[in-house]
Image (spheres, helix red, strand yellow):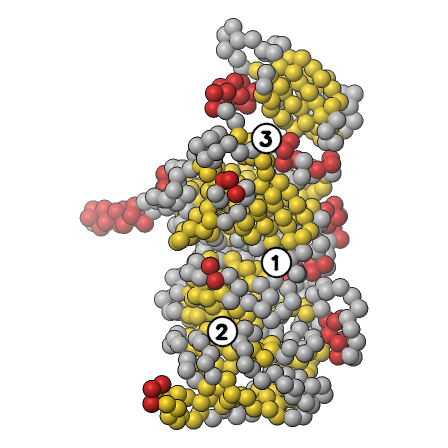
Amino acid sequence: MRLIIIFILTGYSLVYSQPKKTFELVSKMDGIHFLDNNDSTYIWGYSFYNSEGSLRPKLPSPTLMVSEGDSVHIIMYNTSGEGHTIHLHGLDADQANDGVPQLSYFVSPHVDTGNYRIVAKHAGNYMYHCHVTSTMHVTMGMYGAFIVKAQGGVNQVYTGGPAYTKEYIYFTSDMQKSWNDDYMSIGPFNKYKPDRFLINGIEKNQLFQDSSQVIQAQTGDTVLLRLINLGYSAVKYEFPSQLNATFITNDGRVLNPTEKSDTLTLFPGERTSVLLYFNSSYTGYIKVHYHNLYQMKGIGFNEIGINLYSPSLIEEQAILTKNIKLYPNPTTGIVNINFQIKENEKIDIEAVLFDVSGKIVKKDKLLNQKESLDYSSLSNGVYILKLISGNFSESIKIIKH
Amino acid sequence: MKAKFILIFLLQASLGFSTIVSDTIYINSGFLVTDSDSFPVLSYNDSPVFNQGNYVINIQKDDTLLLSIKNNHSQKHNFNIKSISGIDTSAISSGSLKTISITGLQPGGYIFYDSYDYNSYLGLASAIVVKDFLHKHYVLNVREFMTDWNFQLFNLAIPSSSYLPNCFTFNGKSYPDTKMDSSANIMGNVGDTIIVFIVNTGMHHHAIHTHGYHLTILNSTKESHKIGRSKDSFPLYTDEVLTLRVVPDQPGMYPIHDHNLISVTNGGNYPGGMITMFHIMP
């Protein structure tokens, strides 16, 4: 009897020996999203579960990051007013975990829970999205990136593959804003005509106002771009030729041979890992063109900034990027800023507030660890607060409401 | 009734035995019916009776195809094959029968079509498969329509509006009708090798996504540098033929659909259009 139990336990441990990774998500239909020019609209999506009440969804939904070989369990709580699922696009889930309501199951409105289990077999870039009335739920924003890193989470494109020093995820999608504005009258679905073209949910100037969207590299860096397209458009990237763009994986599989090219087109659903080699000084842009799938007519455009910085100044930059607390945001007027600094360190920072057109609307001097900025006289909207110290600056989006 | 006769004779001693395959296709007109629309189309069929699913010609490597084309439509038509030169593309007048001989096709998939005016758009485009394999194979003929255009073209008018398709088909059927079409449902067992030809005979590019499995590109007539890649999302350009191989490693039912989501609709309603399934048994 004891031998049988040991045998069963041994077998169990072999089957489930992979590291386990669990995500708890809540499907939500109450998101408000800001686009360029202070435009706002409604979105749906997934948020991480929080026992105190989950946050409103953002666009895109949270990135789920695991390592090759991980056993992954996604729990989705549906508290919204419509049914939802999670389809793990490209991960080849079995039928029960595929998230197609007619073939797997439907996570009912208000109280239902969905459980999705897969083993992440191949390093690469994937996505998850709702597969209920996809034409509507995807358009409304129910999607996010699912990244499978190399075993152990090391910085290799795939286990044993080329190494990289930094990585960025660029998730392209699009939106016909009037549909999101008034989703009760959405459709007919074949007449979808996107007019907002997004990277990680934002567009145009926003991609420069949010410094995390700009590739920050120094000479010698190898930067991995994880490019994912879930729009209705074919997205064509133009890489600067100086960066020797090399495509390493596509749709979660290693390319053999790899492909070197200064252009890459991703159709809806496709993903590619691209390495950029910063062998020489370069500052500029990656151009991103959106084409419709009828005659490949250009319908949208974005740019991804590339900023080459000097390694000797990293420490000073860190003062601005890591040791700032800014709250509340969104704000009704007063914004508190706290700096954590070393003993005897002096603060001398200029706080410049821009509106979305780039016009300076207020300037303040920050000299203490704790400062309060009064923006109560400003009209509601999106602003960019630029903190400038010496040669360096950091931009933070502030929403006044 | 399809007339298909196989004759075997010696062409040249140096070439060995070659097979002549005789086949007949009929140019028919009728109505393509989905659960939201009914509109006039043309179709290549294997009998004089209209069928909204186009006939696929299958031959073996080294076969000579002796193809008879019967024009049952009121207008003249012709016959051509994409990327193949030397085809007799002269007119086939209404009611007439024309026979052509086609030799030397390399193994793979081809699009045959009518190159006059909008006839290909109206439905006269299908596939020839030249086999050099023994595996089970399927052909998905991907085409979209704008139903208003079809009515105008059948009335010999030039389409007056910009192209905004509202009907999306695999093998002449839209979901849910694709569920009942054995030609559009890929069936097999775990471990089988299945070859899938996807041909785009429409005016839109498409983005075909497979659930459950990655498929290997054996050939692409538009992007040959992608041959050998294993993918789940496939760009499909107009006039492209993709040859794919799948060896299913898990049982189940998994969708195959266009991920340009306007295409999974019928008359603007979801679900519909370009959705079909893998049915894989253990």
Residue A105 position in % (x across, y down) = 53, 56
Residue displayed at 59% across by 16% down:
A390
In front here: A4 or A142?
A142
Residue displayed at 43% across by 93% down:
B7
Which residue matches tag 3? A211
Residue displayed at 63% across by 33% down:
A208
Front tag of 1 and 3 = 3
Residue A290 position in % (x across, y down) = 64, 50
Query: Do we see residue A104 in this rendering?
Result: no
Q: Amino acid at mark 2?
A: Gly
Q: Amino acid at mark 1?
A: Asn
Q: Is residue A199 above or below residue A265?
A: above
Q: Is residue B230 above or below residue A388?
A: below
Q: Left or right? Give the position of B148 relative to A261.
A: right
Q: Is residue A76 above or below residue A314?
A: below
Q: Amino acid at mark 3?
A: Ser
Front tag of 2 and 3 = 2
Q: CA distance from mark 1 to mark 2?
A: 24 Å
Q: Is residue A147 above or below residue A95?
A: above
In front here: B103 or A27?
B103
* Label drawn at residue B104: none
**Is disc 1 placed on a helix, strand or loop?**
loop
Which residue matches tag 1? B260
